[in-house]
């Protein structure tokens, strides 16, 4: 299978072992899957964006700083995978396609201002006709509401893209940026190409089959 | 002033003289303005997209074909402006910024799959802190409804971004792609950076001052 | 065998199915051949060249417009071949060699102003030491005269490069551009490296063995 | 004058206003000087290097991570200078020379593994035949010993390159990395091209004339 | 005026002062002309081509070696001109146009296998609409025959492109490569764009006006 | 094994057969080793550096000329190896890593001014975690003194990096440039990554096993 794995930038902020992601991906490759990894920017991105804002940078430039940090995270992962990964981080979808053609894991951060890395992961999934786009979050799936705010929020094992859009919009209306899984551009790409999406915690990367059978906690997004 | 001019791809389909755009831009430069030009793909883009679809290309690849045609239109205009324009067409916002730094007209087509050239023009306007983004259409502004369908549609001299979003959404709900001025990504950029937008016919490019005074027909979009 | 296939730009103008070329190339690959494909610009190229001429572009710039259209045709074919082809179109022979090294079909349009795509195909054939350069035309080989003008024109199953040069020169003297198979630069490359050339109709791509045995209609060009 | 300013990566770690550097450089430009700025990586670079080490990266790859962070710092400063700076960060001396030719401030981080950003600043100073290389540190010049360790360390207003090498070597023998102003490669470049160097605190950037007269505290390095 | 100066690669082989070319070009710039310089490969190119041939390289690869040497000569001249020249050597006409846009002397060697540097100089002259293409040879113009072989060979102050083609063809028929001023591709470009050409010795670079008046020995090629 | 072979630029000056290096490398590949080849500049490099010096170039520019010649030598070898080698010469370590990822011999010359090609070979060995770095010289190993000056100089079968540094420093103190095997930057990389180095004559390339057993004359450098 062709898998796109989108890992939150927060992963690079967190204390603790980063090698779990590495070994999960190696395991997937060992099983014969092809993997594209998309890394977010996380706290270091926000730090540079804040610094840039104090220096008067415009929004496009601030986005670019965040993109560079996500590319730095991508470079870290690409180098850690050694011969398994293409050693350069693509800076556009065209470049991604070129690197991907070489048969290795391709690790990418952001592409362009105005796009989230979630949108990048959807574009990448579309371009390679991925079997699944796995969105790795700090929680273990999509909740009916923001679990940090609402103790009654429940994990949803299955949602349609339409339901997901409603959840995202309502939570975004509360406070921008606090619960951002998939932005409108990512959703548009997912919908137009009916990309199969799973939202899950990091420890579930290797359990796609079990998730599909409902034996592991995660959220399957069904294109409508 | 720094002006971004977005010209519809249909301009390159139409019979008749293309040199009017050239002379308008030269006039603006003569007045001391700096100009970035963004060209759409138009009918040739659609032709290649249709051809690609018969060959089984995915949506990202189809977008890329359309982007290439918009870049071809950009190259045509850049070469026609000779020494006034940078002779290469940028393929990303980062490259645009580099070319723009050389002080000439920079002509660009599309950047990335999943983005319209309208979104490109908004990104460019944001990145250079443009004074105005001029959207050149085949009609002379934003109408209360699609003028081709509704004889009662009226040209609106001023709309807020909020009103424009409502108009665009309602018209899009009728039939996708038939009345596409500004897509959601373009609107998001315009809103977050409060970019001043004017929608106008080609003949009005040189009349920004008169439009601002209400002496020429066009639509001014006011950021809210 | 290593095969360079040069397909006329007219192929992209013609109504009807483009997938025959795709399936022919896939078949060749399935037989263990390596294929480089060179695409011409065709009618869209001429359209942009005409448009450029009305805007006062010089000959080098007009050539460049035509080259870009031939690259667009190359991109279309490369994307249609999916994993079989390198996903990027080379813009110089050096870049071609780099892409070719990756073991996939490499699809290229024009390289430089002043060169036809026929010359490009000869350069490519020389650089990879191709076994055959297949020139695909809208007719089924080289005729003793332009078959559209002269009803007595006969298809020639074999010509020497010297004979071919005489035919090309005499037909070109009638009206430039109307019967342009191989320009002088292409002929020079073919001669200096004694490249084996076949001129044939599209339907004969898969029949190299049969053509060599004289069982299929086409023209074999013998280097002298 | 042509000035190369090397700013320690620690500058980007420190709390407090980053705009002082911006305004100092703008002032220098206002006085008619041309400026190249070289930024170090600092604490974020060390953070990524540490992270990379836990993932088993080799030294060349770790260097590359640090270089990327120094480039990120360079991008931040380049964007903050807006039209005064070239908007792209060079990744080699050849690219630096190209960007520098455009007449703007050129901001660069590291170039290659195995080279410090101090060596980069010396190379840049050599390549543009700079009048002075200003090394900005967190202290206000070169001390006879590490001032953090030795309360008797005295600031030296003038040292020869030979004396400086002795100081650097003796302090490095204590503990690698704790007092690294200029590494051997930087010293080699400075010596072979007799580059004039000043070591100073950030607040002294604008006082070159006063330093030369001995009216401001800093260290002048005299090539022997 | 816009001038393209093509200097034979032999210039880089010859003993003696290379700075005369530099000072001539500086003088032309001082007079307000814009200059593009095209350098041949000369003896070092032939040396590498010979070496490559012993290693079994094909013709395209041998051409490429020669092109690299011509680029090396171009780099030498570009660096010697310091701030007057763009510091990078273009590798294609598209890149040449980009570098040329920056207002400096652009120095280029070869572009593509199958093209001489004479053809490059004609392409460059066409692309920038040069006023004159100056071909600098080791003799002082075009002779009625090869002056090294025929003591009766006379310098021709004026030739038409048609006459020049006849001279070149007849001399080439004697022995290929011994008297190669302008190859067929160069002639084709010169003819299609009616480029004004002068063939002259190095010492005459600064005497265009005097040559036009017939006061200096050189050959003016008149397009027919 | 992964082997980096550094061949002195003098190899390209010497009369006689260059194909021995080719066949040695092919033999190594046949045995299942992966090879990176680093070529020096040699006499042609010195010739261009001398020429540049007469034209007033600075040290960085002179280094760049030498680097270009080393790249030309690299290109020659890459093209001679045909399908076994990547057909492009990397210009930085990042680019080297990218080309290396494609599984072929990667041939590189110099990277950056201020670095010898010996330093490049050490960087490359570090970056790919090479098993051995083979330094091919015109003599057959490291001698206790310069064998051309001192008839008592003895070949040392084993030296530590510390001993080697002492030998290099003492010989360099006699006359710079006359006995330059490994410069300080190369030594630094070798030490920090404990790279295993062998210094040997060209004819010994294929005898690594025998050298390790002490059955062939060469010098093994042991990291301390």
Image: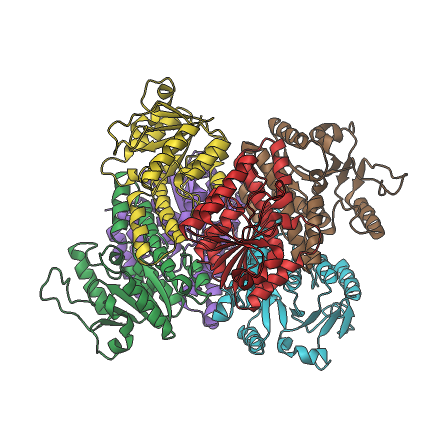
Chain colours: A red, B yellow, C green, D brown, E purple, F cyan
Q: Is residue D77 visible?
A: yes
Q: Residue at x 35, y 56 (%)?
A: C76
Q: Position of residue A215 (x, y in %)?
A: 57, 61
Taking the image as shown, residue C187 lies to the left or right of residue A223, namely left
Q: Is residue F61 visible?
A: no
Taking the image as shown, residue C188 lies to the left or right of residue F57, namely left
Q: Residue A195 falls in which quadrant of the image?
A: bottom left
Q: Residue at x 57, y 39 (%)?
A: A177
- In the rendered image, the residue lying farthest to the bottom is F215
Q: Residue B14 falls in which quadrant of the image?
A: top left
Q: Nearer the viewer, residue F153 or C39?
A: C39
Where F211 falls versus D210 (above or below)? below
Q: Nearer the viewer, residue E131 or A43?
A: A43
The quadrant of the picture occupied by the C terminus of chain F is bottom right
Taking the image as shown, residue E69 lies to the left or right of residue D105, namely left
Q: Nearer the viewer, residue D44 or F222?
A: D44
Q: Position of residue B217 (x, y in %)?
A: 31, 22
Q: Residue at x 60, y 26 (%)?
A: D30
Q: Position of residue C69 (x, y in %)?
A: 32, 51
């Amino acid at each position: 299978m062709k898998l796109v794995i989108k890992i939150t930038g927060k992963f690079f902020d967190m204390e603790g072992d980063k090698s779990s992601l590495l070994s999960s991906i190696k395991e997937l490759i060992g099983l014969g899957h092809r993997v594209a990894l998309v890394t977010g920017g996380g706290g270091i991105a926000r730090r540079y964006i804040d610094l840039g804002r104090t220096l008067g940078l415009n929004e496009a430039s601030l986005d670019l700083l965040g993109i560079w940090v996500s590319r730095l995270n991508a470079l870290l992962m690409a180098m850690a995978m050694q011969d398994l990964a293409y050693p350069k981080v693509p800076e556009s979808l065209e470049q991604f396609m070129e690197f991907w053609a070489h048969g290795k894991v391709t690790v990418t951060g952001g592409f362009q201002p105005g796009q989230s890395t979630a949108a990048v992961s959807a574009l990448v999934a579309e371009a390679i006709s991925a079997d699944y786009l796995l969105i790795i979050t700090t929680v273990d799936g999509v909740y009916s509401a923001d679990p940090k705010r609402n103790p009654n929020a429940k994990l949803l094992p299955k949602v349609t893209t339409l339901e997901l859009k409603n959840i995202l919009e309502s939570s975004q209306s509360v406070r921008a940026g606090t619960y951002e899984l998939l932005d409108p551009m990512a959703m548009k790409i997912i919908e137009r190409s009916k990309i199969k999406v799973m939202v899950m915690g990091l420890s579930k990367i290797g359990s796609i089959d079990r998730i599909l059978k409902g034996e592991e906690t995660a959220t399957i997004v069904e294109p409508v």
